[in-house]
Image: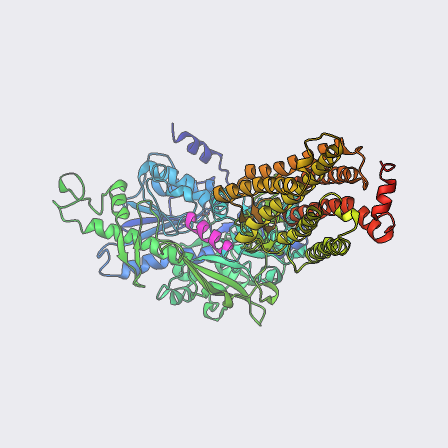
Amino acid sequence: AEMLPVFLLFLMLSASVYESTQPGCKLPGSKVKGTFQDGDIIIGGIFPLYSKTDFSETLWKEPPKPISCEIFGFRPYRWIQAMVFTIKEINQNSELLPNITLGYMIYDSCGLATWALEGTMRLITGQEEPIPNYQCHLQSPLAAIIGDGGSTASIPMARLLGLYDYPQISYFASVPLLSDKSQFPSFFRTIPSDNFQSHGLAQLVTHFGWTWVGILVEDTEYGELSGQSLKEEVLKAGACIAFFETTPIEYSERRFHEVITKIKQSLANAIVVMSYDSYLIAFMEEVARQNVTGKVWIASEAWSTSQILSKKELLKTLSGTIGFAIRRGKIPGFKGFLTSLQTSRFKNDIFMKTFWEQAFGCKWASQDSYRTTSNTEIGTAFTVCTGTENLGALNISFFDVSDLRITYNVYNAVYSVAHALHDLNSCVPGEGPFGNGACAHIQTFEAWQLLHYVKNVNFNNNNGEKVFFDPNGNPPAHYDILNWQLHPDGTIDFVQVGTFDASAPVGHQLIINESAIMWNGERVQVPRSVCSESCSAGYRKAARRGQPICCFDCIPCSSGEISNQSDSTECTKCPDDQWSNDRQDKCIPKSTEFLSYDEPMGVTLASISIFSALIPVTILYIFIKNRNTPLVKANNRELSYLLLLALMLCFLCSLNFIGNPSRVACMLRQVAFGIVFALCVSCVLAKTIMVVIAFNATKPNSNLKKWVGPKLPNAIVFVCTVIQVIICIVWLSISPPFPEHNMKSQIGVIIKECNEGSTTAFWCMLGYMGLLAIVSFVVAFLAKNLPDSFNEAKFITFSMIVFVTVWLSFIPAFLSTRGKYMVAVEIFAILASTAGLLACIFLPKCYIILLRPHINTREYLMGKGSKST
Ligand code: TRP
């Protein structure tokens, strides 16, 4: 049942041309053509000699012809010749397979799975009609099959051959799928699996910083499977794929146009192309015609050394191409073999005649030329081939054996079979690998027996290179990296600029000599191929919604955050005591801030307080000068002096708040302020109480008389102040204020401030002061209407109102400002309240003393005393 589809396939193959020189082997109805040579053991070969795509110049001018396998390939023909040469060499070698002659049967596959399958069937059944499961004719057994070139044909071949256990060794089929030994148990190859190439291409792409790459693949299994592996590797390497397109293997104007538009519109300048050269040529011609410039083409092994692509029309487009190529090797003697090709020597080689025609541009007169149709087509002007033309005089790349890569793979493939056969032949009975030490016989061996030997083949070829297959049937992966450089004479040189060795340790696999590379248009700089230019330090990448990670916007770090590398994905926060610099790429120490004497605000406040402090001093001076006037004498002269001194200290204690908050300054600040103010307010309180007492003492029989005099006010002032002193001592001893670096409350700066230590103590101190103030306010208020010659109580009431108001409004202002402004607010409150006290209590007195001295006399007082209220 497995074979049914294959069988039907053969029935469907229709006949057009048949030609085979092997007598008695006619197979009418087949297109597949072959070349044969008999031997004791046959090695089969399948080669994509012809191709069905027309890549001639005519494409530029007229629509393509319908598909037919008419295009002769010099390159595959060289592969065929390599196989023929190798077999000849082995036959002449008296050490390898002595006394055994190898023969070959080589079929053309035209790169088509169907043709390759038919060729395979013919090989395993014999040259007769390909009947599955029959081996019709051969005395000489088929050993193995070399081929096919393309994976498209090799995959079905491998499935078929796996069924019969025939070893198959491909020289060019590289798709990763073929490494799967459960599906393809008898498949081997002398070309590395594309997994390695994909990995290498991905590394190459990232090496040049190309993160935005386009991928074009031919529309076959090779394109699909190897392209898939390339896609994965490129993504794994961190680059992104701008587009992934298939190029048709036949000319298709619509599709070409689509793809080329994509290429033109894309920002991707690096385009990896995985396509066989003869499938690519029409496409590249279209690309050249549409003037697509500025792109770097990256070639896979399938076209990196293509002669047909390095032609004049494509030079402008393709120079600068970077390609992965299979490692090359020398085949000693091959050049001589090629140049000595003689039509007469190859009677059986029907391909030879076409080769001759193509090489010399002549036509065979007889009808036995393979390309029967071409004669009429080209029509008129051609010379007739004689067979005596001199190959040696031809200067075509076919004879250039300096750069053999796939050809060298063919060479190794054939040798592998020969060595396997040799090993099989040298088996010592009793020590053989098969049941009970049995050996296989060289004339009658089964395919699976040879398969065993192929798996284990391991030899040094004529180049001294080791040839073997790993458990998956692959050779070691080693690639050359080529650069297509424009030669002054208008040709392309494939210059080796590096290597990729998959067996090297990670990081050393890809070696590139960048200085040797010539980019397209002789640019010196590596072309760019990115979706977004990289973000410099100070910025972070922000992904664009719905787009690949390589497309991003650069967003500056927010203040306080930095990124010190280009292309960072995140900004990092600076430590608490540091802040970002202007470029956001470094954390620098934050500037510290406090209200200092160096800044205008500090200086202003300081000078205001010093200046203000002079006022009480002046008043004190005036008072002392007029100390004997009734106004000064009234209501306790000493208390007034003390109050004036206290007010001066109040002004001065605001200086404490300016400047670098040291440990001592912090302690002194609130404490000095608290004590001085308490002193002030208690003086006021004492004054008020004295007004009350003085009034009441004038009443007859008052026992308050004994309180009149300096004792009571002194006691009040002392006690009230001492209470505050105690509060402060307790505060200082339990948890004193200390300087602190505040990094949180204001961004970007460190605020040097005093921590109150115990806020409770702080509020206690303020509260106590408030209490004193309120008590004096209440007392003064009650006493405001008492007859008093200088309205002392009234003014004290005012002053207390001012004082309390200032401090009440200070609370919200204090709480809502930060840093040095908070300190400034406190200074302001101190100055304002002190000024309030000073003004309310002393200005009226000064006014009288200085400007109304006539009121300030005992006589006046006595006279008016009763009137005044
Ligand atoms: N390595 C390629 C593959 O595995 C080579 C290739 C691609 C090829 N397309 C081709 C070879 C067509 C011959 C014909 O398929």
Please state the horizontal and vertical placement of residue 131, each as a whole percent of the image: 37, 35
Residue 249 visible somewhere in the drawing: no
Please check the rendered image and state whether residue 346 is part of the magenta-colored stretch, yes or no: no
Quadrant placement of the N terminus:
top left
Please state the horizontal and vertical placement of residue 77, each as a whole percent of the image: 45, 56
Task: Label the magenta part by its dominant secondary structure.
Answer: helix
Q: Residue furthest front?
A: 701
Please check the rendered image and state whether residue 199 is part of the magenta-colored stretch, yes or no: yes
Colour setting? rainbow
Q: Which of 372 and 124 lies nearest the eye of the viewer?
A: 124
Determine the residue positioned at 22% across, 43% down.
Answer: 444
Q: Which of 126 and 747 lies nearest the eye of the viewer?
A: 747
Q: Is residue 159 left or right of residue 515?
A: left
Boundaries of the magenta span: 194-206
353 vs 27: above or below: below
Please state the horizontal and vertical placement of residue 48, each as a whole percent of the image: 46, 49
Q: Is residue 542 left or right of residue 795?
A: left
Determine the residue positioned at 23% across, 55% down.
Answer: 97
Q: Residue furthest top?
A: 1
Displayed quadrant of residue 499: bottom left
Displayed quadrant of residue 766: top right
Quadrant placement of the C terminus:
top right
Query: How many numbered badges does the structure rendering display?
Result: 0
Q: Is residue 175 left or right of residue 744?
A: left
Q: Residue furthest left?
A: 430
